[in-house]
Image (cartoon, rainbow, N blue to C red):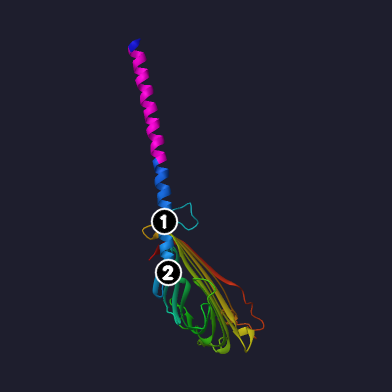
C-alpha cells in the first residue's frame, strides 16, 4: 500500500513539474516574441531613416503562378484524354535617384501568362501554350525640384505587348509639366503638354494625338509586404475616342527568405483597342458585316486581368 501511494505521489510530482516547465517555457517564449517585435520596430525605423537619404534606390518583386495537369483514359471526364496548363509571370522593378535639386524615377512592369487546353483525342486541338495576359510598361520621370513637394518634370512612358503583336499597338507618351510628391513613395504627375505616339498597322483604329497626361505611382515596402499601385491616363485634346487609362495594382507578401504569395490585378479602358478588336472579329466572319465597326458604334468595355501565385522579392 505504501509503495502504491509513493508511486502515485511520484507521478503527481512529475506531472506538476512538467506543467510548471511548460508554463515557464511559454512565458519565456512570449518574452522572446516581445523582444523580436521591439527589435523589428527599431529595424523598420532605421530603414525608414536610410530611405530618406538621397541617392539611388533599387527594388524588385514578382509573382509566378502555374497549374499543369494531364489526364489519360480518365473516363469520368467528358474529355478523358487532355493536357492542360496555365503559367503566369509578373515582375515589378524600380531604380530611383533622389538628389537635393532633382530626382529621376524609373520603373518597369511585366505581366505575361500562357494557357493550354489540349484534347488529345481531337487532332485539330492545339498542343501549344497560347498567350493570354500580355503587359509590358517602362516609365522614366525626371524632375527639377521647385520645393520639397513640387518639381518641373518630363515623363517618358512606353506600353506594349511582348508575346503577341509587339509594338502593334505600342504607345509612347512624351510630355512635360508638374510633379507633386506630397508624401514619401507617392508621385503624382500632371503634364498638360503631352504627345501620345501610337504605333500600329491598323490606321483606322489607332491614331497619335496631343493631350494631357496624368500619372500616379505609389510603391511601398513595409516589412514583409510589397505594394505598388500605378495609374496612367491620357486625355486627348483631339477627341475622347483617342483617350485611354490603365490602373495596375501589385501585392507581395514574403514569409520565408523573400518567398511568399503575390497578387496583381489590372484595369484598362482604351477605345482604340476596342475598335481594333471589333474590326478584326468582323473581318474574320465568313460574310463581314457592312458597314463595319466605327468609334461611334463600338462598345468600349472595361478590360481587366488578375494573377495569384508564388512571390519573390529582392
Residue 126 placement (x, y as % from top left): 43, 69
Q: Position of residue 27 (x, y in %)?
A: 42, 40
* 25 in the magenta segment: yes
Looking at the image, which residue is at 34% across and 21% down? 10
Q: Does residue 239 appear anywhere in the picture?
A: yes
Mark 2 neighbour class, 10 Å CA radius: few under 14, some 14 to 19, many 20 or more? some
What residue is rendered at 41% in x and 44% in y?
Answer: 31
Q: Residue at label 2? A: 51
* Residue position for label 1: 40
Quarter of the image with the N terminus in it: top left
Q: Is residue 51 above or below residue 80?
A: below
Q: In the rendered image, which quarter is residue 304 located in? A: bottom right
Decide: few, some or many residues near mark 1? Use Cα within 10 Å; few <14, some 14-19, many ≥20: few
* Residue 110 to residue 158: above or below: above
Task: Give how far apart the Cα atoms at labels 1 and 2 are.
Answer: 16 Å
Magenta-drawn stretch contains 68: no
Q: What residue appears at the point 46 percent right and 77 percent down from the top-left corner? A: 137
Closer to the camera in the image, 201 or 198: 198
Label 2 SS? helix
Mark 1 or mark 2: whose residue is earlier in sequence? 1
Is residue 168 at least partly visible in the picture?
no
Look at the numbered disc 1 and give the secondary structure of its residue. Answer: helix
The answer to whether residue 70 is left or right of residue 169 is left
Q: Quadrant of residue 247?
A: bottom right
In this picture, which residue range is highlighted in magenta?
Answer: 3-27
Amino acid at each position: 500500500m505504501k509503495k502504491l501511494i509513493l508511486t502515485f505521489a511520484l507521478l503527481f510530482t512529475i506531472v506538476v513539474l512538467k506543467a510548471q516547465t511548460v508554463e515557464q517555457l511559454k512565458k519565456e517564449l512570449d518574452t522572446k516574441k516581445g523582444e523580436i517585435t521591439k527589435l523589428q520596430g527599431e529595424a523598420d525605423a532605421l530603414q525608414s531613416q536610410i530611405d530618406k537619404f538621397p541617392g539611388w534606390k533599387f527594388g524588385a518583386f514578382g509573382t509566378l503562378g502555374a497549374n499543369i495537369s494531364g489526364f489519360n483514359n480518365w473516363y469520368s471526364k467528358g474529355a478523358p484524354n487532355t493536357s492542360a496548363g496555365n503559367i503566369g509571370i509578373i515582375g515589378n522593378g524600380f531604380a530611383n535617384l533622389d538628389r537635393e535639386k532633382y530626382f529621376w524615377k524609373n520603373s518597369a512592369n511585366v505581366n505575361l501568362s500562357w494557357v493550354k487546353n489540349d484534347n488529345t483525342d481531337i487532332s485539330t486541338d492545339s498542343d501549344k501554350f497560347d498567350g493570354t495576359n500580355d503587359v509590358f510598361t517602362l516609365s522614366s520621370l525626371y524632375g527639377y525640384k521647385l520645393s520639397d513637394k513640387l518639381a518641373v518634370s518630363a515623363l517618358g512612358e512606353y506600353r506594349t505587348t511582348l508575346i503577341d503583336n509587339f509594338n502593334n499597338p505600342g504607345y509612347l507618351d512624351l510630355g512635360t509639366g508638374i510633379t507633386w510628391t506630397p508624401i514619401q513613395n507617392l508621385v503624382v504627375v500632371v503634364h498638360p503638354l503631352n504627345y501620345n505616339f501610337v504605333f500600329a498597322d491598323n490606321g483606322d483604329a489607332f491614331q497619335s494625338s496631343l493631350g494631357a497626361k496624368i500619372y500616379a505611382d505609389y510603391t511601398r515596402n513595409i516589412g514583409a509586404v510589397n505594394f505598388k499601385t500605378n495609374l496612367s491616363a491620357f486625355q486627348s485634346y483631339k477627341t475622347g475616342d483617342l483617350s485611354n487609362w490603365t490602373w495596375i495594382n501589385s501585392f507581395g507578401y514574403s514569409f520565408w527568405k523573400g518567398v511568399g504569395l503575390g497578387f496583381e490585378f489590372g484595369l484598362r479602358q482604351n477605345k482604340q483597342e476596342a475598335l481594333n478588336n471589333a474590326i478584326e472579329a468582323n473581318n474574320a466572319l465568313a460574310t463581314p458585316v457592312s458597314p463595319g465597326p466605327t468609334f461611334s458604334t463600338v462598345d468600349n468595355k472595361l478590360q481587366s486581368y488578375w494573377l495569384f501565385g508564388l512571390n519573390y522579392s529582392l
